[in-house]
Amino acid sequence: EAQVTQNPRYLITVTGKKLTVTCSQNMNHEYMSWYRQDPGLGLRQIYYSMNVEVTDKGDVPEGYKVSRKEKRNFPLILESPSPNQTSLYFCASSLKTGFTYEQYFGPGTRLTVT
Amino acid sequence: EDQVTQSPEALRLQEGESSSLNCSYTVSGLRGLFWYRQDPGKGPEFLFTLYSAGEEKEKERLKATLTKKESFLHITAPKPEDSATYLCAVLEDSSASKIIFGSGTRLSIRP
């Protein structure tokens, strides 16, 4: 089954404790992206990757890191989480055929930073 | 500043009552406009891509249209299962990689 998986689905952590949210897709997609979703603000892009070893900042990259060492994986790293990073996070992938960014989204990771 | 604005924020309809959702955008150049559906607790699900003014796409009770400044998602004779949040997003010309989402319209269909 074609899918995007994220782990963990739920995470409660404390300020300053490094964490990684994993994202994996099994569709051989080139384009992958991370978003955060907050009430009233919609989905905001954090980072995106056009292919292996190619990443770029979205609208809200501060406090986050990413890497793309393999085509299928795109982990999101919070080196020193803060309470303002409490949010619902989504990973997405797409083929990037021409400009058809038909994105497939993961189920989401709800992060709480206390 | 590039922006995507959706209206209304919330819309409640009776089953069978047709209506439209609006997505207006201000970007330097539009490469593509996307509509997604999001159910509570789930990731968005792709519906349509529109590329140029005048283009239309249809899927069941949904039809998306595009002008130079906005897009409409028309819902004809909706059913309760159409209740969801509908998101609009644009891929703008200058980056061709960064995607900007609107904050969505929460649609509720009463039986």
Image: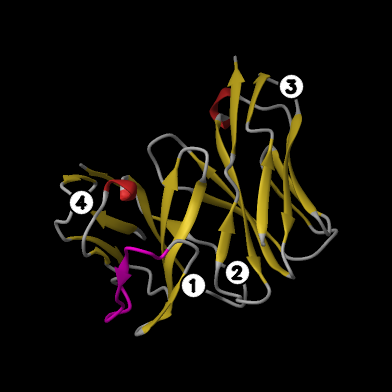
Dots 1, 2 in contact, CB < 8 A:
yes
Which secondary structure lies at badge 2? loop
* Percent x, y of residue A41: 52, 44
Q: Please tell me the numbered disc located at residue A8.
A: 4
Q: Residues within 10 Å of mark 4 (few under 14, many from 20)?
A: some
Q: Label 2 lies in what chain?
A: A
Q: Please tell me the numbered disc located at residue A112.
A: none
Q: Is residue B67 above or below residue B14?
A: below
Q: Earlier in the sequence, mark 1 or mark 2?
A: 1
What number of labels is visible?
4
- For marks 1 and 2, give the CA distance: 8 Å
- For marks 2 and 4, give the CA distance: 29 Å
Q: What residue type is disc 3 on?
A: Glu
Left or right of residue A62, residue B55 in this image = right
Q: Please tell me the numbered disc located at residue A100.
A: 2
Dots 1, 4 in contact, CB < 8 A:
no
Q: Label 3 lies in what chain?
A: B
Q: Earlier in the sequence, mark 2 or mark 4?
A: 4
Answer yes or no: are tags 3 and 4 on the same subunit.
no
- Which image quarter: residue B79? top right
Residue that mark 1 sits on:
A95
